[in-house]
Amino acid sequence: MEQDQTQFQSPTELEHSEKLSREGSRPPSEVPGYDIQSLIGAGAYGEVWSGIDRNTGRKVAIKFYSRRSSVDFSLLTREVEKLASLAADRYVVQLLDVGWDSVPPFYVMDFIENGSLEDELHRRGVFPTNEAIEMFYEVAIGLMHLHNKGILHCDLKPGNVLLDGDHKPRLADFGQSRLSSEQAPALGTLFYMAPEQANLTAIPDAKWDVFALGALMYCMLTGSPPYRSPETIANLESASEINERLLRYQKALNSAGTARLHRELPGVDKQLADIIDRCITVNPNQRYGNVQSILLALRQREETRARKPLMLLGLFGPILLLTIMTVLGWMLYSRSMDKAEQGLMDKARESNSWAAQFASKTATDEIDKFFSSVHRLSRNKIFLDTFVEVLADNQLSEIRERLSDPNATGANREFITQFEANPVRKRLQPLLQEQLDDAALKDASWFATDAKGTQLAFVSEDNKYTTIGKNYCWRTYFSGKPSDFKEITAAGEYYPVPAGPRQHIRVSHISAIFISQASNRWKVAFSKPIYIDGQFMGVVAATVHCGDLVASIQEDNIKKNDQINQYAMLVDFRGGPNQGAILGHPYFETYTSRGEKLPTELLQQTIDLKNTSAKEIFQDPLAKYDPRFSGEWVLGKQNIVRTNFDSLPLQNEDTGMMVLALEDAGKVMKPVNELSRQFRIIGIISLAMVVFVGIGLWLMAIRTAKESRERVSRVFRSATETTTLEKEPT
């Protein structure tokens, strides 16, 4: 940082100052009672030396006015008088002694051990914002003390602010100071001097010290006073006369624009920057009128900063509280809902599992009844004797041979008519009718085939159609294969094309599902091979609509043609082209109860339990046909088994069919939904309370801030109106 120079020095005086600085090897004179030690500094009007008071051993500073031939003793008188009037003020260097009659004259003052603020700036470059503000505040208090005594410093700069042992500022060098009643001009230091002060006819004003104080703060933050630039300095130094230099200085400041470097520094907030700007503004009418106003602005800034956490608390505290409460409440709510939902779901799944087990047991009993009846019939002596007679009949043998020919099947209806009318064959019909009439085996159809798959006898409940004489060796109930194998023959019918002897079942068998030609519903057959003397003679079987195996569970729900809360369905999960087919469903009953065929589209609907959620929430694919089955359903499932009557001891085998018991998830979750609704009401009430408290805190913070601003404004107005500079006593 460049050395600041006090104005009011001619070129001759500057040359003399340089000479004095070179001749600083010995003091100008002896001072009685003091031992002079070393030169501290030199100026236009004298030198400052350090010394020791012989009586007390106290270190002091001695200022000599060494230019006796031209010195204006009024400078010494003025400075001593100002220092005397500020006795005991800790913000001012204290006067200890005066040598009026000495040659040269001198005065003794406190020795300030840490040098000047200018020296500190040379060492550090700039001050941290907080330290600069503290120094700014302390210097402002010192200036206020001066002004209250009626003294204007008029030459405030870093070199005239000394730092004591605690690094607290002490104001020094009152050579240019003026009393408020004085009309004599006083020139300060370039770039610390207000532009209106740079006039040899200017009347001293407190705003001069205000400008210098702002420039001092600007320098502590940026390392240089405001408006100073190499171009401006070169322009000022090129002026030969003092008046021209002062005029150029005024023009330079008026055209410099607003100083903004301090606004870019970290830690300088808008309020602080505005205070500095108002201090160093070129227009004196826009500048603070006195130092008290600066101190009030600083206090107001501190109060604003102190209120800021309260304002933030008032604004963001409720939001933070609300957020925390919302997060915690949501966590508790979610956890509670999850536990409640899990508990209800577990109970619902358990209940549905029992329902599925019950339905599965019912279906198992039905299947066992059919297998037991088929098994008994395959060993019934009367049936077997009649069966043998039919096979032994020569006429029937020729017709059966004809009917088993794939190129002739269905081509000649008269053969089937002859076959149906044969009295020997008709003897099998009553035996099958007895099975059909069994009350325990309702809604079934019975048939028997020869060894090539041609049906010898057939009975059904409605007798609307017959399959006697037709060959069904391609059906799984005859072949025992997982799926039907068939091909369209030249005659236009399905017929197998086996390689070698026809394949047939060896033990009792449950067939793959197939569509009934009469009802267009899924059916399944329970078949048993007929062996006579170890030779395969044919197959006896019973068929049943798959939906009838679980129909008893659906009846109550279907009769209530409103909302269905719980129902069961039967699904085939065996491999093959019909895997996942829905065999029995309450919706099917809306057609069968009216004697209508099921639409083929319904038979094409399948279920894939792999797509069921981890919580076993199921969505019914038939919901698009009937809204009663829409939504989510809690799933329970159970495989259907059947008794293998060919094994001893009897064993159970999986049929590949499964019962799905379903319960309306909305009904299951109704208690949880009600609890959730109550929680939401409580949450809304809590939220309203938090918002109410938050608004109250915010309004309280606003009111507190408003009262604080009004209080500061009152103090500011009072200080502005009542604080005046004391006039110099006569």
Image: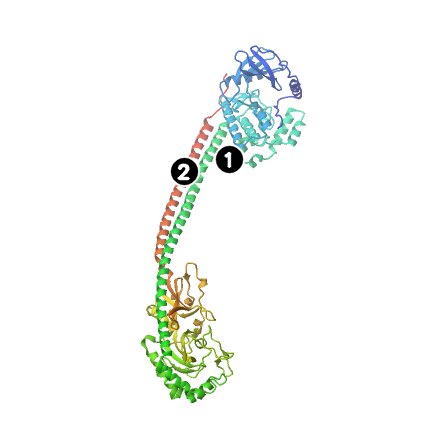
What residue is shown with label 1?
A: 271
Mark 2 crowd level (few <14, some 14–19, many ≥20, 10 Å Cα): few
Amino acid type, residue under disc 2 in the picture: Arg
Q: Quadrant of residue 626?
A: bottom left
Task: Please say which color scheme the image uses.
Answer: rainbow
Q: Which of 536 and 621 is in front in this view?
A: 536
Task: Classify residue 161 as left or right of residue 687.
Answer: right
Amino acid type, residue under disc 1 in the picture: Gln
In whole angstroms, how far apart are the C-alphas of marks 2 and 1?
Answer: 21 Å
Q: Position of residue 707 (x, y in %)?
A: 41, 35
Q: In which quarter of the image is residue 418?
A: bottom left
Q: Compared to 652, does 184 lie above or below? A: above
Q: Are marks 2 and 1 in contact (CB under 8 Å)?
A: no
Residue pushed farthest left? 439
The answer to whether any part of residue 566 appears in the image is no
Q: Where is residue 67 in the image (x, y as percent from the top left)?
A: 63, 15
